[in-house]
């Protein structure tokens, strides 16, 4: 799982760069209100950067359990039941991601002929965020399930020592 740590780090850096670019574009948008020239592309680009920063950061949040959740009842469950519960949730996310990938890919093919109004690139690039999110969630949900049961085997080994 050392490879996953490196992938996590790379994805985290990409998410931070996208968010920093988003902040820069928003600052340009705010400052352009005080200049005679208006940057009309900033609103559209900020929207796309926001979407892609969420797409990149969401799988990391899944792996690190940083999503908002109500776990009052879950904390009362025994540890092994809690792991099974968490794994079932990850399997449901995996299944949802497969459906999301299929429909997202269809959306990308529909967006090939459409272009962004101010930036001029194909909307397929924008719509590609959906299948990208689906692939990342699939990978990270499988990794999360493996981590759940790998932690069980590591705890059993520590108890035997």
Image (cartoon, rainbow, N blue to C red):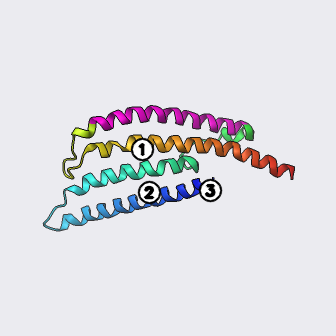
Answer with left or right where residue 135 lies relative to residue 120.
right
Residue 19: which quarter of the image? bottom left
Q: Who comes first in sequence, dot 1 or dot 2?
A: 2
**Which SS does the magenta portion mostly show?**
helix
> Nearer the observer, disc 3 or disc 2?
3
Q: In terms of image quadrants, where is residue 21?
A: bottom left
Compare marks 1 and 3 and give the one earlier in the sequence: 3
Report which quarter residue 130 is drawn in.
top left
> Is 151 above or below relative to 28?
above
- Whether tag 1 and tag 2 are in contact, CB under 8 A, the answer is no
Residue at (47% x, 33% y) in the render: 98
Q: Earlier in the sequence, mark 3 or mark 2?
A: 3
Q: Is residue 80 toward the left or the right of residue 6 in the image? A: right
Residue position marked by numbered label 1 in the rendering: 132
Range of magenta residues:
81-110
Contact (Cβ within 8 Å) of mark 1 with mark 3: no
Q: Which residue bears the numbered disc 3?
A: 2
Q: Secondary structure at mark 1?
A: helix
Give SS at disc 2: helix
Label 2 sits on residue: 15
Q: Nearer the viewer, mark 1 or mark 3?
A: 3
User: Looking at the image, which residue is at 20% across and 50% down?
Assistant: 120
Q: Residues within 10 Å of mark 3 (few under 14, many from 20)?
A: few
Residue 105 magenta-highlighted: yes
């Amino acid at each position: 799982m050392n490879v996953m740590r490196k992938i996590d780090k790379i994805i985290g850096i990409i998410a931070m760069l996208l968010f920093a670019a988003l902040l820069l574009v928003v600052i340009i948008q705010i400052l352009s209100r005080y200049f005679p020239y208006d940057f009309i592309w900033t609103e559209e680009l900020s929207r796309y950067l926001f979407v892609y920063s969420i797409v990149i950061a969401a799988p990391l949040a899944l792996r690190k359990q940083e999503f908002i959740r109500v776990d009052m009842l879950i904390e009362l469950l025994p540890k092994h039941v809690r792991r099974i519960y968490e794994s079932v949730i990850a399997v449901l996310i995996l299944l949802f991601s497969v459906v999301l990938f299929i429909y997202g890919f269809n959306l990308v093919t529909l967006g090939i002929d459409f272009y962004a109004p101010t930036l001029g690139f194909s909307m397929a690039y924008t719509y590609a965020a959906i299948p990208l999110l689906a692939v990342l969630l699939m990978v990270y949900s499988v990794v999360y399930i493996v981590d759940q049961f790998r932690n069980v085997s590591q705890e059993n080994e520590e108890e035997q020592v």
